[in-house]
Image: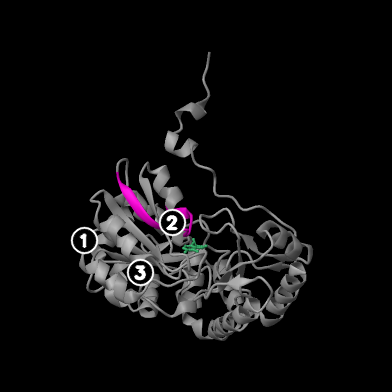
């Protein structure tokens, strides 16, 4: 009797539940921390014109040096320590692949961005979850203890600001930690342009530090998939071995360069999103039974007196899609809303108020 091929899939994979996102009908999309402002039409046009001229039958650049130079100029880190990825997700995967295998551990705050735990488990590594403090700040002492106290813990990941909480990891605590270890510390700064706080200055002093960034949020580029990692040139060489060749298609390469050149044009929108975040947070907190947590990202985590599924449904009935994060550890009462334009945010506030009765 023939067996199913599925039986040969690694147990570490079969045990996982897939990372999914359900499709909903909506009018306002406030569920994925995207930028509500699209790339300006004239910039899109220039990129498309280049795409029309350039041959599609030829591979993209093997190592996109010109792009690395531009990312170096933007980030302030050396070009030979930069790796571009098909979304920062790809760099996450390559990083985990070079550090983790069966018997290794990864230390993660909990809750945090789920892709880290997922990739680590596919690699048969053990995930050590360190709960956040009740106010959603990082428990720095517990994270240090879990990481430094266990030689098998090969990687510590800190998303700062954290997703889905919006909290920062204090830079002084990060530096103190880096002084005590030579194992890899990954700081995911996907929301850096909204927090304006970065560990990039520490890269020079600590060759075990990796900083990740993405174009999916502030740069309005989620549709194209582009992110990058900053690290020592020696480590970049190793991570590069686990990355697929030609991972950046020519279109994303050209567009990312154009966006860096035109970043001033995107800045007003980013500034407005920061202002809007700080405007709506107190307005959410005065609503009856709402607790919204301070955020340094472009989203806000909030709890209400009604069950999150009911709030989610009530908002969706008004055409507003947010993220129900109540299945995350510690977040049984919580939802997450991405900050949008002033009028979208006002609509969200009105609908939330109505949902609360
Ligand atoms: N890191 C964090 C903390 C994120 O929130 C996200 C996106 N949700 C990513 C990485 C992935 O970004 P990308 O689109 O570049 O793969």
Displayed quadrant of residue 347: bottom right
Give the mark nearest the N terminus, 1 or 2: 2
Mark linked to residue 65:
3
How are the colours assigned in the image? one colour
Name the residue located 32 percent from the left edge and 48 percent from the top edge.
105
Q: Nearer the viewer, residue 281 or 36?
A: 281
* Circles 1, 3 touching at the beta carbon (< 8 Å): no
Say if 8 sits above or below 136 in the image.
above
User: At which x and y percent is residue 146?
Assistant: 30, 55
Give the mark nearest the N terminus, 1 or 3: 3
Residue 112 counted in the magenta span = yes
Magenta span of residues: 104-116
User: Residue 168: in sight, yes or no?
Assistant: yes
Position of residue 356 in the picture relative to residue 218 (left or right): right
Q: Which residue in the structure is indicated by mark 2? A: 90
Please state which of the two labelled residues, at mark 1 or mark 3, is closer to the viewer: 1
Ligand 1 neighbours mark 2 (CB distance < 8 Å) = yes
Residue 144 counted in the magenta span = no
Q: Secondary structure at mark 3?
A: helix
User: At which x and y percent is residue 42?
Assistant: 62, 80
Displayed quadrant of residue 103: top left
Please state which of the two labelled residues, at mark 2 or mark 3, is closer to the viewer: 2
Q: Which residue in the structure is indicated by mark 1? A: 182
Mark 3 Cα shell of 10 Å, populated few (<14), some (14-19), many (≥20)? some
Position of residue 98 in the picture relative to residue 110 (left or right): left
Q: Secondary structure at mark 2?
A: helix
Say if 228 sits above or below 269 in the image.
above
Q: Nearer the viewer, residue 108 or 236?
A: 108
């Amino acid at each position: 009797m023939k067996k199913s091929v599925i039986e040969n899939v690694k147990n570490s994979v079969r045990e996982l539940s897939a990372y999914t996102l359900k499709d909903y009908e909506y009018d306002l999309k406030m569920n994925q921390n995207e930028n509500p402002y699209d790339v300006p039409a004239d910039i899109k046009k220039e990129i498309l014109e280049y795409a029309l001229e350039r041959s599609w039958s030829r591979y993209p650049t093997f190592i996109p040096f010109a792009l690395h130079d531009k990312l170096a100029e933007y980030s302030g880190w050396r070009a030979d320590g930069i790796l571009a990825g098909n979304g920062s997700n790809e760099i996450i995967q390559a990083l985990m692949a070079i550090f983790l295998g069966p018997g290794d551990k990864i230390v993660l705050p909990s809750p945090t961005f789920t892709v880290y735990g997922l990739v680590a488990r596919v690699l048969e590594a053990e995930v050590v979850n360190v709960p956040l403090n009740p106010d959603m700040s990082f428990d720095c002492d517990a994270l240090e203890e879990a990481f430094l106290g266990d030689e098998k813990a090969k990687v510590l990941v800190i998303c700062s600001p954290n997703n889905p909480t919006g909290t920062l990891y204090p830079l002084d605590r990060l530096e103190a930690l880096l002084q005590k270890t030579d194992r890899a510390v990954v700081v995911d700064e996907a929301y850096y342009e909204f927090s304006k706080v970065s560990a990039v200055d520490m890269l020079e002093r600590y060759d075990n530090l990796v900083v990740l960034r993405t174009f999916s949020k502030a740069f309005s580029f989620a549709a194209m998939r582009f992110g990058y990692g900053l690290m020592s040139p020696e480590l970049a060489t190793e991570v590069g071995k686990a990355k697929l060749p030609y991972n950046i298609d020519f279109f994303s390469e050209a567009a990312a360069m154009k966006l860096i050149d035109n970043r001033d044009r995107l800045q007003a929108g980013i500034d407005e999103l920061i202002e809007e975040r700080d405007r709506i947070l107190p307005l959410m907190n005065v609503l009856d039974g709402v607790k919204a947590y301070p955020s340094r990202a472009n989203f806000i985590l909030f709890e209400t007196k009604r069950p999150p599924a009911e709030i989610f449904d009530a908002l969706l009935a008004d055409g507003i899609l947010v993220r129900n994060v109540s299945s995350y550890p510690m977040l049984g009462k919580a939802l997450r809303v991405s900050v949008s334009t002033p009028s979208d945010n006002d609509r969200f506030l009105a609908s939330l108020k109505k949902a609360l009765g």
